[in-house]
Image (cartoon, rainbow, N blue to C red):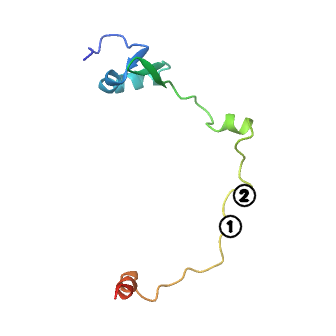
Amino acid sequence: MTPHGVALKREVGVRELHDQLSRYVRHAAEGGEVFVTMRGQRVARLSPLESGDPLAELRARGLVHEPAQRKRPVSGRKRLAAAAPVSDLVAEQRR
């Protein structure tokens, strides 16, 4: 185990990341970046989220569009009332 006073590594193995996850997440939230390795190979990157609209880049690339209507129109249909409990219908079908 790594003592809390030691500086965090820029590249960390999965086991150490697991043991010190809250420290590495806090480090990323503060703007740091950490590469995660498995058997010496980089497999992931832990980095801070960009603030702002997460879909802005997708909109700019034309991959996402705003909906034409904001809300679904309210249906004029009334809710159907059940003639009997569903459990009775299931029991009847099992006979």
SS class, disc 2: loop
Position in image of residue 32 (x %, y %): 48, 18
Q: Which residue is mark 2?
A: 69
Which quarter of the image is occupied by the N terminus? top left
Position in image of residue 64 (x %, y %): 70, 44
Label 2 to label 1: alpha-carbon separation: 9 Å
Task: Indicate left or right for 22 with 63 as reference.
Answer: left
Task: Indicate left or right for 80 with 60 as reference.
Answer: left
SS class, disc 1: loop
In the displayed structure, would residue 91 be above or below residue 74?
below
* Residue 45: assigned label: none
Please tell me which residue is depicted at 68% across the width and 37% down the height of the picture: 58
* Residue 73: assigned label: 1
Amino acid type, residue under disc 2 in the picture = Gln
Circles 2 and 1 in contact, beta carbons < 8 Å = yes
* Residue 77 vs residue 90, the one in the foreground: 90
* Residue 24 vs residue 13, the one in the foreground: 13
Position in image of residue 18 (x %, y %): 32, 27
